[in-house]
């Protein structure tokens, strides 16, 4: 297939693009390089630099003729979205409307969309399955939910078939060590810990130790980015074969606390990784764990690399090179 990966220079997009190309697809990347990096652009890709808010640019690149789009271009810091909702409304929602309209104009009818566990909000039960109520507690999650609803209407009215992949906490780096671009100003736990280990920031702030969890810190379902990339490949194949839209969770079905990740990172990196306890971060639930049964049944997908040691070791292999 000829595939346009929008946001393909970013953290998750770069892993997805690499695996799609490895599997024999012709990959083109569209990215504004605001959070993505040129280091993630491999020589076998075509690259179009531009912004999804630039509609004429989107229309012009889609003229190159693609069988499918993978759309990962978005702002993703849940905390920031509560302070800068305009940024998230525009980049995530307006940007996606532009992509959908340009895709319709170009006759592209398959799209894989990066959705998020953040659409569910505070869990009513665990593990969270796809039927769980959807009441996001942060504006980022709201933008992802709105886009899923838009996709449903574009399916009904324009015949666009979509896969909405609801990522839990993406972490780790390419199992084969090829993707090496660092995230710019990360806010997520694992890259923050890696930056501390590498001496790029002074300490980790632990956002609360008074949650109703075994060690008091937040528990999340960390899913290795190579597992996520695999799911995108399977989702595209399923869209091509079944021509039916779907939404699935992508998680490891296991929970890890902030302290468990920190402990593993200290052990694997051999670095002290200073940390201090601060207030809870607003909008953070205590515990999120996925049910990935639907992805297993529909796509034959399950997490293979999402144990804590693999997540930390593959991340450290990349960050170690930047030791201050
Ligand atoms: C959030 C979204 C998730 C989304 C992800 C994208 C929610 C509930 N979850 O994940 O769906 O895919 O953003 O970025 O909106 N932590 C610290 N110190 C730090 C950073 C994080 O203690 O410096 C803690 C957090 O409190 C949390 C855990 O580490 O318990 C993971 O946080 P993070 O990596 O930021 O991801 P989420 O907020 O869970």
Image (cartoon, helix red, strand yellow):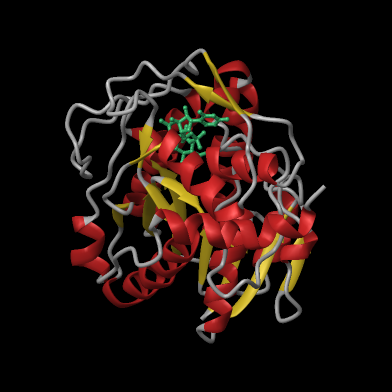
- Which residue of the protein is positioned furthest toward the bottom in this rendering? 24
Left or right of 25? Residue 150 is left
Q: Nearer the viewer, residue 81 or 99?
A: 81
Left or right of 283? Residue 86 is right
Residue at 71% from the left image edge and 57% from the top image edge: 320
Residue 11 in view (yes/no)? yes
- Residue 195: x %, y % from top left: 69, 43
Residue at 61% from the left image edge and 34% from the top image edge: 187
Left or right of 195? Residue 117 is left
- Residue 291: x %, y % from top left: 22, 49
Q: Nearer the viewer, residue 214 or 286?
A: 214
Looking at the image, how many numbered discs can be counted on the residues? 0
Q: Is residue 212 above or below residue 74?
A: above
- Which residue of the protein is positioned furthest toward the top in this rendering? 279
Q: Nearer the viewer, residue 212 or 289?
A: 212
- Residue 211: x %, y % from top left: 34, 19
Q: Nearer the viewer, residue 134 or 258?
A: 258
Residue 286 picture quarter: top left
Left or right of 185? Residue 223 is left
- Residue 302: x %, y % from top left: 29, 65
- Which residue of the protein is positioned furthest toward the right in this rendering? 324
Residue at 78% from the left image edge and 54% from the top image edge: 322
Residue 148 picture quarter: top left
Residue 172 in view (yes/no)? no
């Amino acid at each position: 297939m000829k595939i346009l990966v929008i946001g393909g220079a970013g953290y998750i997009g770069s892993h997805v693009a690499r695996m799609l190309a490895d599997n024999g697809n012709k990959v083109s990347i569209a990215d504004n390089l605001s959070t993505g990096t040129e280091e993630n652009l491999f020589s076998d890709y075509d690259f179009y630099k531009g912004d999804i808010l630039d509609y004429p640019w989107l229309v012009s690149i889609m003229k190159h003729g693609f069988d499918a789009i993978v759309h990962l271009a978005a702002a993703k810091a849940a905390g920031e979205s509560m302070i800068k909702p305009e940024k998230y409304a525009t980049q995530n929602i307006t940007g996606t409307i532009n992509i959908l309209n340009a895709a319709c104009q170009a006759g592209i009818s398959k799209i894989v969309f990066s959705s998020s566990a953040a659409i569910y909000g505070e869990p009513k039960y665990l593990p969270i399955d796809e039927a769980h109520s959807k009441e996001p507690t942060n504006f980022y999650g709201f933008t992802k939910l709105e886009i899923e609803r838009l996709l449903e209407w574009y399916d009904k009215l324009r015949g666009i078939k979509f896969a909405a992949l609801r990522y839990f906490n993406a972490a780790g780096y390419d199992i084969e060590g090829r993707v090496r671009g660092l995230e710019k100003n990360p806010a997520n736990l694992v890259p923050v810990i890696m930056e501390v280990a590498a001496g790029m920031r002074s300490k980790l702030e632990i956002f609360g130790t008074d949650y109703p969890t075994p060690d008091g810190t937040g528990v999340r379902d960390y899913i290795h980015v190579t597992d996520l990339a695999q799911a995108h490949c399977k989702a595209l194949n399923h869209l091509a074969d079944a021509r039916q839209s779907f939404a699935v969770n992508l998680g490891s079905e296991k929970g890890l606390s902030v302290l468990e990740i920190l402990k593993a990172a200290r052990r694997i990196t051999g670095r002290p990784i200073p940390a201090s306890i601060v207030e809870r971060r607003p909008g953070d639930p205590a515990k999120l764990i996925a049910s990935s049964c639907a992805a297993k049944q529909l796509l034959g997908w399950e997490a293979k690399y999402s144990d804590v040691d693999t997540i930390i070791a593959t991340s450290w292999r990349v960050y170690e090179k930047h030791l201050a």
